[in-house]
Image: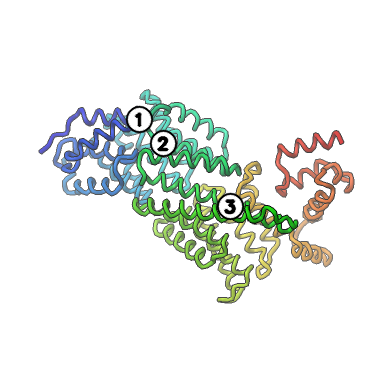
Amino acid sequence: MKQIPEELLASLREEIAHRRISTGIRRLESARPLLETLNASQPRAAALLGYVAQWIDIGFANPAYLAELVGNFPAAGRGNLPLADYAHLRMAEGLLANYRDENERAIEHFRFVLSIAGEFPDRGTLAVAHFWIGRCHRKEGRYDESYRSTQAAVEIARSLNYPRMAAVMSVLESWINFQKGRHGEAIRILREAQSALAGTDDYIVLGNIHSAYGRIARREGKYDQAMEHCGLAIAQYQRRDPQHPSLGRVLANMAFVERLCAQQLRRKIDRDVARRKHEQRAADQARMEELQRSAFGHLDQSFEIFHANRHRRGEGNVYTIRGALHLDRGELDKAEEAGRLAYELGDEKRDRILMARGRILQCMVENAKVEEGIVDQSPDQHARLAFQYAMEALESARLTENQRLLARAYIWQGLTLCNDLFYNPDAARDCCDKAAALVKPEAHDYLWDDLQALRARMTGEGAVDRKLREWSQGQVHGRTFQQVEEEFAELVIPKVWEREERKISRVAEKLSMSPKKVRRILSHLGLLDGTRDAEAEEKEGSD
């Protein structure tokens, strides 16, 4: 029976703490003959397995290799393991459960390790247990619990004087701040982590940092910056492992941004056609189609990586992005199939976030069928399906702390309620108000665009005619006079603002109302942002 050198265990522990990644991986590669004979009867074998699990998470080997090693420790042979060694085995089992999207089961394993902290001398592994619990909560959309666990991990790492380990864990802390809308704090933490890890070969975490920068830029509508950071992240991941799941994730994110850029070009093309500006149309059309092709290519690469790693959420997210691209191109059958597959993958793992995303895509497809008059079944049936999918998306989103996902579900429920076949303006306005309360007005990204589309649908010509007719007949649907007045102002002020060359002072003078109220209503409708508004006000004051 081969002995497990204590020096090997100590070196693996130290390399993890100080993020000497290539050194640790080379050491493990040379130890593969030893790893392949690990079993429960071998002294310190379970401890070595626990460290190997941490290294697999860093980039050594893949989850299938971990499953193979864990299989050499059947339940019947564990009874004589020392408690600390058994805890390492539970860490390996927890990581394997996490890879399989069995997050609650993974958390049980990690909490067991924390429960014996007094009997477990390796405090660095205790920090990893907290960190992995935080990651499980993040995948479930439980951001407050994730934040607490991640902070506990960072504090332990700092107390051990492991600044690089703390920096790695703080990237997740930054991600939670980002999800909570605290972009400035998220960027500050990322910069500190990037500085702490500068000069290391921890390419996966350095890639994660660029990926996070890209997501923040995307949220702020800075799509060129988002693609630049995605490209930098891809380069980092490829330096470590061209099949790493994080590479699959950032390829999907790149495709998502390419789709958003293509949508912007589509809107520009439509505006140019309406204004009889045809000169640039051909070039814009070609660029839009190029972006779509590139997005499909990145999605194919992403899916291949996720499928090889049996990463079900990753596969599901690829389906939702691919389905949205098909929807943009009018390929409704393909979009419908993608939404169904995404939902089924989420349902299989009870992944509420993926279930909601799948249902939202299916809702979008059914709404498109109503608008295009698809006759495979009655239009009423498509409208009812769209509403059912929106309700199911809401139900799943409410079980997470993902506020933007919830806002998106409200938006698509509202857009469904605006259909001529399902027209309910009061309910649509309620959805709009609930979504608006969850969307940060300074982030003018695709979600903000969807919210503006809902507002535009509610105040479209048909909606305006119907509303004016209802008011003329005294139908106010339980609203107070002040509420009716506000709705009327939201109809009239944007039109006058456009006629008066978007000058707030002119609108206020023309309608004999305060510039402050004009500004408030335009801001509420998403027609102003703070910086441009302040500059306009200063300019108007000098006119």
Estimate the x, y position of residue 99 in percent, counting from the top left. Answer: 35, 48
The label on residue 205 is 2
Q: Nearer the viewer, mark 3 or mark 2?
A: 3
Does dot 3 land on a helix, a strand or a loop? helix
The label on residue 284 is none
Dot 3 amino acid type: Arg
In the rendered image, which quarter contains the C terminus?
top right
Instruction: State how far apart marks 1 and 2 are (Cα).
Output: 10 Å
Q: Residue 246 versus residue 93: which sits nearer the camera?
A: 246
Estimate the x, y position of residue 369 in percent, counting from the top left. Answer: 59, 69
Marks 1,3: beta carbons within 8 A: no
**To which residue does mark 1 refer?**
19
Q: Residue 333 versus residue 440: which sits nearer the camera?
A: 333
Q: Residue at x 42, y 59 (%)?
A: 345
As drawn, is 486 to the left or to the right of 432? right
**To which residue does mark 3 refer?**
287
Marks 1,2: beta carbons within 8 A: yes
Q: Residue 408 versus residue 497: which sits nearer the camera?
A: 497
